[in-house]
């Protein structure tokens, strides 16, 4: 896994607080859960806990789940009355099944092999009640992959707590085993006109076609209820609503 979620966890928390409208994210997922009358949920990829507050104050029984302890440390400071679990989404077992599982922030993009996807969906299926809701988002390969400009630098800027951050990224195709791309980023603090480097990050990110996602869900005993184009700050994204059979 990349350093953005470990060494740079505090930078992630600051920058993504400006990139992502977490209230909108909460409203999207909560509307899905309310439609199916679900009150208990596990959020896979809960990160620094930016969605937790919204779920808790609106009466949901919430569990957070993430691979990176550095992210969870920040989440626990923000939400000391919440339970966060450190674990691997490919293999986990909750004390009891939940009514719903959401996988936020396109977390499925870090499952680079088909076996990883299979293992994760099996774990999710095993930890959901029968008829439970599984909702997640993913990067659309059909839209995103053809538009990648090899080596082009993409700059994102954010101001948080009186600190000005800059991220300079490059996306390059990596088609060795799937519709993946390599995301290389340098992170800076800006002081006047000077950029001071504070860290680097290098990740392989997987994109999916809708058809791939449909097949994975069908063979793992999920019933797809809806496929939705979802607003995103950086990538063309779809969201899936599925039920455990």
Image (spheres, rainbow, N blue to C red):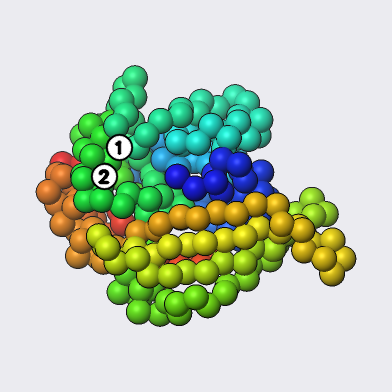
Q: What residue does disc 2 label?
A: 116
Where's residue 94, x and y in %? 34, 24
* Residue at image point 41% right, 30% down: 87
Q: Are marks 2 and 1 in contact (CB under 8 Å)?
A: yes
Q: Is mark 1 on a helix, strand or loop?
A: loop
Residue projecting furthest to the right: 192
**Which residue is drawn at the image coordinates 37% and 70% (left, top)?**
173
Mark 2 is surrounded, within 10 Å at the Cα level, by few (under 14), some (14 to 19) or many (20 or more) other residues, namely: some
- Residue for point 40% across, 80% down: 147
Relative to 157, is 12 above or below?
above
Q: In this view, does 80 lie above or below 109?
A: above
Furthest residue toward top: 95
For disc 1, the marked residue is 90
Q: Kindly tell me whether residue 113 is visible in this rendering.
A: yes
Q: Most extreme residue toward the left, as rendered?
A: 219
The x, y position of residue 129, in whole percent, is 25, 32
Q: In which quarter of the image is residue 224?
A: bottom left
Q: Nearer the viewer, residue 151 or 164?
A: 151
- Asked if residue 30 can be seen in this view, the reply is no
Residue 160, position as x, y percentages in the image = 75, 54
């Amino acid at each position: 896994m990349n350093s953005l979620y470990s060494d740079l966890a505090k930078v992630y928390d600051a920058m993504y607080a400006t990139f992502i409208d977490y209230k909108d994210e909460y409203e999207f997922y909560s509307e899905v859960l309310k439609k199916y009358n679900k009150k208990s949920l596990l959020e896979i990829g809960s990160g620094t806990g930016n969605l937790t507050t919204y779920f808790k104050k609106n009466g949901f029984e919430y569990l957070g789940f993430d691979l990176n302890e550095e992210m969870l440390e920040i989440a626990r400071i923000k939400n000391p009355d919440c339970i966060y679990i450190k674990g691997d989404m490919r293999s986990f077992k909750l004390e009891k099944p939940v009514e719903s599982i959401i996988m936020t922030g396109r977390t499925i993009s870090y499952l680079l092999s088909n076996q990883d996807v299979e293992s994760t969906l099996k774990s999710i299926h095993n930890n959901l009640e029968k008829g439970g809701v599984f909702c997640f988002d993913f990067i659309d390969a059909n839209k995103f992959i053809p538009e990648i400009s090899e080596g082009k630098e993409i700059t994102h800027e954010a101001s948080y707590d009186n600190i000005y951050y800059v991220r300079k990224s490059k996306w390059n195709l990596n088609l060795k085993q799937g519709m993946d791309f390599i995301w290389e980023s340098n992170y800076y603090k800006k002081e006047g006109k000077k950029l001071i480097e504070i860290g680097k990050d290098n990740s392989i990110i997987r994109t999916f076609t809708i058809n791939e996602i449909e097949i994975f869900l069908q063979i793992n005993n999920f019933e797809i209820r809806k496929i939705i184009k979802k607003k995103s700050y950086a990538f063309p994204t779809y969201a899936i609503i599925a039920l455990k059979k």
